[in-house]
Image (cartoon, rainbow, N blue to C red):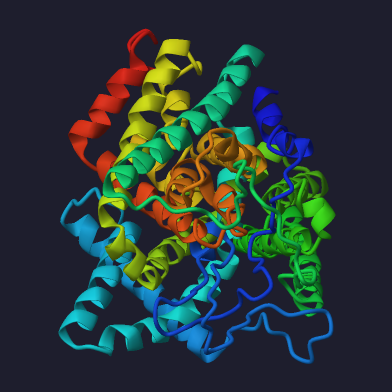
Amino acid sequence: MTKIHLLLVAVLPAFIGASTFRPHGYLPPGARTVTKHNSAVDVSSVVSSASTSDESICAFSYRGGDGSSTNVDIPKSSELVGAAFFTALQIVLNKVFRANKITFPAMLGCTILVFASLVLAEAVFPGMGENAFQLLTPGSNLLAKWLPVMFVPGLAMLPLAPSIGSAVDVLKVLSLIIVGFGFTMASTAFLVLGMRTVQGRIGTNPTVNDKGKAATTAASSPPPKPFTEETLKFLLKGTVLTGAVSMAASRQKSSYATPLRTVFMFFGTVLTYVFGARFPPAITKIVHPLVIATAGTLLLTQLDATITGSSFKDILKTYKAGSLLPTKTGAGDLLLFLLGPAVGCLSIAMYSRKKILADNLPVVIAAMLCSSVGGLFGTAWYVRLLGVGASVTVRLSLLTRNVTTGLAIIITQMLEGDMAIAASVVVLTGIFAATVGRGMLDFLKIQDPVSRGLGMGAAGQGLGVAAMMPEKEAFPFAAINMVLTAICGSALVSIPAVKESLVKIVSTGLGGGSD
């Protein structure tokens, strides 16, 4: 029951006033643009919401309203080309890394390789890097648009996760989320503030008034729905049709039952996410579409089990089988496979902010190291001192609390933790950050936009970073530090000595460190 409770409480903190929520994939008015230089590319590849640009020269909208004459959700050729590039590169690097026994995640290798190549190409042959950037941006945006649904497998597998422990253990995990977020954000923000004070570069955030309270900005118009009604209807028909065929095949003990269930659950997962993302803002401010998609996926799993006469857990095990073989793979396996190319797209978001990175490199590096090293080791010591969790697996699953979901799953797999627990903790952290993050920065009287942005990016996940969108000067730094914290954390865990040190810290006091 404690595992189900942890999933349910993911929506509770938002009831206390998560007024900064935006559904994954939303863009605020005026933010649907791509420019050539220092472009406002959709940083939703990380935060599921885009940055803004005042000097837009090329409108690039990829969401439609209900009155669209065509379904803008249908991928264009330019989008498919870019997405295919990242997918192919991910597959090649994965094979190369495995052949050479490289433990570093191939998807992060893709991110670093593409970013470095674009920067080098632009430096050696001016214009080449920018042209490649423009070529890859549509594909990056396509993958970014669907990125949140790729996190569903992590949350959906929570019923099969190891038990966290008693109700007291659940409360300890919640304390980790609250205390950990506050500590990471405050320590990073104050570190940056101190460095910028020494540099004499303290700025004033125009969206924060003299008393430190964040100013509110009224939206000129309600944001359009992130997916068209045509897409929703198509997914609904596909889910119903494939579901009927899949369940009939299962009842007949057909050899095609597993592949058919995979197609059915893939349709169903995407359908429930799109359904949740199209809810009115009053609802999505309270319950994030990712939570709705997870709940919908579990309900479809229960429906399948009931009609086919199987157990819920047996059907759920086929959702993520840990294989990409056509006869064994599940919908969750396919979504996690797509997560690789989507993570590679972080390179486009980073390149679009290369000037900001270069101009503020010392404080950005300091913030990255503070949030990644402090997040991993600080969390490890916290769970050890409080005795959080009933096993080493559970404790290791909590270490990625301040790493954005996609890479938190990767790091957790490297640590041999449970990705369902990790994903749940990350979502809870993001909800809490979006709810109280800006207010906490105001309370600490941190008005410098760079310090505010890097602080939130260090601890707030995609939802927390999205909450910084009204602060135009702070938002890019929040997005940058969230990406760099995740990359640095992954790099650290890929070092055997670091991994062993973390395991040793959390395993102390657990009777030999075994489950």
Tell me if residue 255 can be seen: yes
Say whether residue 466 is left or right of residue 242: left
The answer to whether 43 is drawn above or below residue 407 in the figure is below
Q: Residue at x 59, y 69 (%)?
A: 145
- Give how far across and how far down residue 48 sits, in percent: 58, 61
- The reply to whether residue 414 is visible in this rendering is no
Quadrant in the rendering for residue 168: top right
**436 over 246 or under it: above or below:** above
Residue 295: x and y, percent? 74, 46
Q: Could you tell whether 5 is left or right of 209 in the image?
A: right
In the foreground, 387 or 331 = 387
Residue pictured at 28% horizontal, 89% vertical: 127
Residue 502 appears left or right of 233: left
For the C terminus, which image quadrant? Answer: top left
Q: Nearer the viewer, residue 78 or 210?
A: 210
Q: Nearer the viewer, residue 228 or 26?
A: 26
Q: Position of residue 229 (x, y in %)?
A: 81, 76
Q: Residue at x 33, y 69 (%)?
A: 354
Task: Classify residue 281 as left or right of residue 121.
Answer: right
